[in-house]
Image (cartoon, helix red, strand yellow):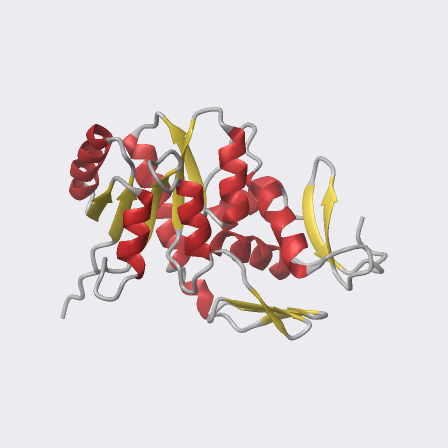
Amino acid sequence: MTVTAPTPRILLVDDDRELTAMLSEYLGREGFDVAVFHDGGVALERLVEPGGERRPDLIVLDVMLPGRNGLDVLRALRARESAPPVLMLTARGDDVDRIVGLELGADDYLAKPFNPRELVARMRAVLRRVSDPRTTHEPLTLGPLRLDPSRHRATMRGASVELTGAEFRVLEVLLRGAGRIASRETLTEQALGRKLELYDRSVDTHVSNLRRKLGLGAEAELEIRGIRGAGYLLTRPDDATTP
């Protein structure tokens, strides 16, 4: 018996009607089931109301929206449990929106204008990461940190830590290689599913978020150490074998 994979459900939220019409047609040909909203507040209401919009596998969310902008929508989504992954659309060169989006929990971003083929490639990369069969691995621990990939759950000193999908994957890569340096290229490819681009600071933003959420301050039992020109490593501060 042949098992057919379900069609990925995409929620496209952008007020540019010409763009959304073009993308809906293009994404449909690429095998996606697309729902479109032109208002962030309406999209959010339909996602949370009983009997509303079916939970999408991925949300493609523009920052500049009438009423409730994309960053507000993202913030509201990340306040809820089991929110779907989000790919943000930002204005080209607007680093502030990109960085804030990543800090709020966006899984990836793409600057406008863009080639639809690149959008599809990034969407598929996010979807692959979400459904990665490696998430069936046994829990990982280092000192007070415990990561359970099968349940997408992180705890620090026994307390649950809410991480976005991208943050979780960056931490998983660092934890699997604890005590060894992971380059920014490696973290971008293994955790974010794409090649590192010039001026791409996504990994740095995710690491900053992880330090804050995990409470990795000066007196912490663990640290994510930045090695200039090399990358990052997860280690114990008293481990003399690390750089």
User: What residue is rendered at 45% in x and 41% in y?
Assistant: 194
Near-viewer residue (155 or 38): 38
User: What residue is rendered at 53% in x and 40% in y?
Assistant: 100
Q: Position of residue 177 (x, y in %)?
A: 64, 57
Q: Residue furthest left?
A: 1
Q: Quadrant of residue 90?
A: top left
User: What residue is rendered at 18% in x and 66% in y?
Assistant: 3
Q: Position of residue 101 (x, y in %)?
A: 49, 42
On screen, 117 above or below 33? above
- In the rendered image, which quarter contains the N terminus? bottom left
Total labels drawn: 0
User: What residue is rendered at 33% in x and 44% in y?
Assistant: 40
Q: Is residue 34 left or right of residue 160?
A: left
Q: Is residue 103 left or right of residue 30?
A: right
Q: Is residue 215 visible?
A: yes
Q: Is residue 163 left or right of residue 77?
A: right
Q: Position of residue 135 (x, y in %)?
A: 45, 65
Q: Position of residue 196 (x, y in %)?
A: 52, 36
On screen, 162 above or below 61? below
Near-viewer residue (63 or 105): 63
Q: Quadrant of residue 26?
A: top left
Q: Is residue 180 visible?
A: no
Q: Is residue 45 left or right of residue 86?
A: left
